[in-house]
Image (spheres, grey):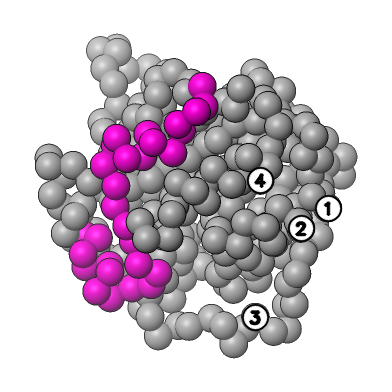
Amino acid sequence: MTSSDAQPDSIAHRIDTTRPHTARIWNYWLGGKDNYPVDEAAGQQIRELHPGISDYAQADRAFLGRAVRHLTADVGIRQFLDIGTGLPTANNTHEVAQRVAPKTRIVYVDNDPLVLRHAQALLTSSAEGSTDYIDADLRDVDHILELAAKTLDFTQPVALMLLGVVIFIGDDEDPYGLVRRLLDALPSGSHLVLSHTITRPDMADVDEAVAFWNANGTPRLNQRTPEQVTRFFDGLELLDPGVVSCSRWRPEDTGDPTGGDPAEVAMFGGVGRKR
C-alpha cells in the first residue's frame, strides 16, 4: 500500500481523545478495539437511546460486502474509490474485492488521523493489485480526484463508495452537488454505492440518538428521509431493489424457513450505475 499526501509523524497531534468521534464509535459498535473510553461512553449512551444502533452498524458493513462482491464478481469492476473509509475492520473493500479479483485497485479516502494511522498498517493490498490512502475530506473533490488518478484509471469504470459519509455534509454545503462532481469524473459503467442514516416518523429513537450525538460528538450529523437519500442516485440506473434498508439490499440466504425479509434498520443504501 502507498499513502498519498499523508505524513505519519505529523498526524498524532490531530487525534483528539477528549471528545467522542464518529469513526471510533462506529468501531466500538462493530466490536472493534480502536477507540477510547470517551467513545465507548458516548456509544453506550447512544445505544441506550437507540438499542438497534449496533444492528445497523453491522448491516451497513454487510451491505458494503455484498455490494463490492456483486460489482467485482458480476459486473467486472476492478477499481474502487472508497471515501469515508472509517477505521479498518474485517472485510474491508480491498479484501472483499481482491478475493474475487486479486488485481483490483482501491483508493481509500478519509480525513480522520486515527483512521490514517491504522490504514497505513492494515489496509495492505494483494501482490497483484494495489491500494492507496488519501488524507482528505469529501468536500475536497478536486484534490481527491487528482491524487486518486495516480492509482485509478478514470477512463475505465470505477465504483464510488460513499458509505455513511454524506451524512456529515450539511444541506448548505450542496451534498448532491459534491456527489455529482465525483460521478461526473467517472466514465460510463461506473457505479455509486451509498448508504445514509435516515429519519422517518416510525423511527423517533433514531432522531433522539442523532440529537444526542450532535450535542456531544464530532462531526455533526445530518439526517435525511429515504426520498432524499434516493435523490443522490438521480440520473443513474438504480439497481434492484433500489434504496432500501441496508439489511434488505440483496440479503444472503440465512436459511430462515419463513423466507421473511430481514428487520429494517435506520441505515438505507443503494447501488446505481452510470449510463
User: In the rendered image of this protein, does residue 257 appear above or below residue 125?
Assistant: above
Q: Label 4 neighbourhood size at 10 Å, few (<14), some (14-19), many (20+)? A: many
Residue type, mark 3 in image: Ile
The residue at which mark 4 appears reads as 81
The residue at which mark 2 appears reads as 147
Viewer-nearest of discs 3 and 1: 1
Given residues 191 and 267, the one toward you in this image is 191
Inter-mark Cα distance, 4 to 3: 23 Å
The stretch drawn in magenta includes residue 191: no
The residue at which mark 1 appears reads as 150
Residue 252 appearing in the image: no
Q: Label 2 neighbourhood size at 10 Å, few (<14), some (14-19), many (20+)? A: some
Residue type, mark 4 in image: Leu
Secondary structure beneath dot 1 equals loop
Q: Is residue 199 left or right of residue 34?
A: left
The residue at which mark 3 appears reads as 11
Disc nearer the start of the sequence (4/3): 3
